[in-house]
């Protein structure tokens, strides 16, 4: 992904997040009411149970454990070691940024949760932005950008997985009545924006290649900043 395209997408996601942050101060929006009304038509027992499992996948604890395993896997299996460490630190930074910024923004905006609509226990934290949605979007975007930084082929399946994961987690939060739709869209935007911001600011480390292979014993590293 070219630096210009990354900056363009980053600008859009930040703009969307700022617009939603300003708009949500007015309380639940017409879009929020439409989303609740539409999803209410699909509320059946088997779908509710499915949504509970999906929303659990986007929980902070589970994603933290999975993210740690991915970072350790990058350190263990990617080579050379300096390059694997670079990718692991990048991915860890994306997830850490998503978690810390979400907590700060929730306290800043202090938007109450939807009242009387929850199908599960209502969390005690504030609503805006959705932490599950932000973490899921950061996770999906982070995985895709790590793969791109590693020059892996066939990124489309990974992009589809990341997008579908974030979409399902976000929709589950609205379906279960613990978030407004604008909370979720803001979480998606902020999660993707955070991953792109770290990608832009963090150097991509490459190893020099000779004949398509990394020379044995070579310690020479070439850093190329994405900006």
Image (cartoon, grey):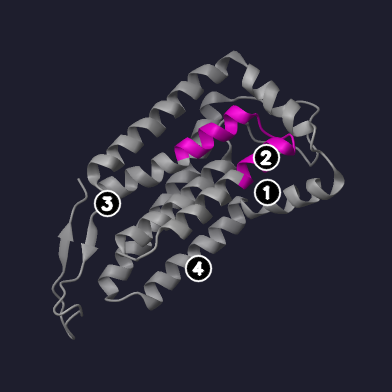
Q: Is residue 209 left or right of residue 90?
A: left
SS state under label 2: helix
Total labels: the figure holds 4
Q: Residue at x 23, y 40 (%)?
A: 4
Q: From mark 3 to mark 4, how far is it between C-alphas?
A: 21 Å
SS state under label 1: helix
Which residue is identified by label 2?
A: 173
Q: Tell whether label 4 touches label 3 (CB within 8 Å).
A: no
Give the residue at the far bottom of this rendering. 216
Q: Residue at x 73, y 29 (%)?
A: 38
Q: Residue at x 39, y 26 (%)?
A: 15
Within 10 angstroms of label 1, few (less than 14), some, or many (20 or more) residues?
many
Q: From mark 3 to mark 2, how far is it between C-alphas?
A: 32 Å
Q: Nearer the viewer, mark 3 or mark 2?
A: 2
Badge 3 or badge 4: first in the primary sequence: 4
Stretch in magenta? 168-190
Q: Nearer the viewer, mark 4 or mark 2?
A: 2
Q: Nearer the viewer, mark 3 or mark 1?
A: 1
The picture places residue 223, in percent across and down from the top left corner, at 17, 60
Which residue is identified by label 4?
A: 69
Badge 4 or badge 2: first in the primary sequence: 4
Which residue is identified by label 1?
A: 55
């Amino acid at each position: 992904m070219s630096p210009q395209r990354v900056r363009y997408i980053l600008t859009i996601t930040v703009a969307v997040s700022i617009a939603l942050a300003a708009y949500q101060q007015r309380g639940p929006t017409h879009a929020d009411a439409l989303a609740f009304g539409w999803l209410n038509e699909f509320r059946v027992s088997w779908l509710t149970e499915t949504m509970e499992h999906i929303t659990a996948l986007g929980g902070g604890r589970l994603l933290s454990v999975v993210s740690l395993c991915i970072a350790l896997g990058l350190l263990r299996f990617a080579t050379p070691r300096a390059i694997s460490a670079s990718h692991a630190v990048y991915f860890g930074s994306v997830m850490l940024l998503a978690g810390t910024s979400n907590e700060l923004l929730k306290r800043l905006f202090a938007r109450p949760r939807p009242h009387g609509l929850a199908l599960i226990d209502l969390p005690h934290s504030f609503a805006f932005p959705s932490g599950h949605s932000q973490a899921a979007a950061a996770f999906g975007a982070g995985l895709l950008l790590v793969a791109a930084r590693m020059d892996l082929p066939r990124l489309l399946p990974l992009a589809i997985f990341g997008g579908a994961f974030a979409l399902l987690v976000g929709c589950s939060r609205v379906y279960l009545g613990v978030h407004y739709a604008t909370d979720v869209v803001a979480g998606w935007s902020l999660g993707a924006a955070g991953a792109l911001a770290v990608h832009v600011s963090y150097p991509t480390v490459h190893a020099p290649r000779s004949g398509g292979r990394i020379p044995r014993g070579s310690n020479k590293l070439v850093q190329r900043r994405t900006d």
